[in-house]
Amino acid sequence: MYKQTLGAVCVLTTLAGCAGKPENPVDYLTYRDEPLVQQVDLDMNKQHVLEIGGPPSSQMTRTVEPGTCQDYILNKDGHQQAYHVSFNSAARVDGKGFMTCKQMESNERARANRNTGGGGGY
């Protein structure tokens, strides 16, 4: 049983590393039944997200890509977890995950710098 559990953790860790998103797979397993995680899909409109998740804890205007981002705090068994839903300029979901909007924006900025060759090298 121990070897099976260890094997499953290794597979999940590997898959998480390949996804390019620094998220903990345990977060998904813990919060997968939360309405925001389970019901919000890509290209869903902002109003529908608000109906599912209620008002966000905060909202910001995105700077790397046009649009906005909403932060939520998921709660389960006394534990809290940040979760974001990002929207494009047409107010449609273009991303979501277990990090804050600020963290997501920082990741997008780093990715954009890598893709454009920016980064301050000589």
Image (cartoon, rainbow, N blue to C red):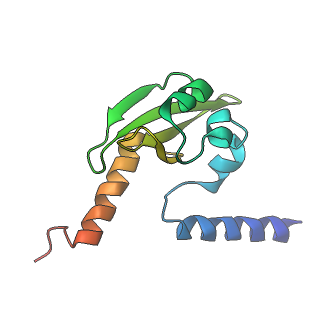
- Which residue shows up at 54% across the image and 54% down it? 23
Name which quarter of the figure residue 101 lies in.
Answer: top left
Q: Is residue 100 above or below residue 55?
A: below
Query: Front-most of 77 and 104?
Result: 104
Residue for point 63% across, 47% down: 27
- Report whether 86 appears left or right of 111: right
Above or below, comparing residue 78 to residue 66 in the picture:
above
Where residue 84 appears, as percent x and y from the top left, is: 49, 40
Picture coordinates of residue 11, whole percent (x, y): 69, 70
Task: List the single residue furthest toward the front.
Answer: 90
The percent coordinates of residue 53 (x first, y second) are 59, 28
Which residue is farthest right? 1
Q: Is residue 53 left or right of residue 66?
A: right
Q: Quadrant of residue 14?
A: bottom right
The residue sitting at 68% across, 70% down in the picture is 10
Foreground residue among 17 and 34: 34
Q: Left or right: 94 with respect to 49?
A: left
Above or below, 65 relative to 17: above
Residue 54 picture quarter: top right
* Spot occupied by residue 97 in the image (x, y as percentages of width and height): 53, 47
Q: Nearer the viewer, residue 60 or 66?
A: 66
Answer left or right for 66 relative to 48: left
For the C terminus, which image quadrant? bottom left
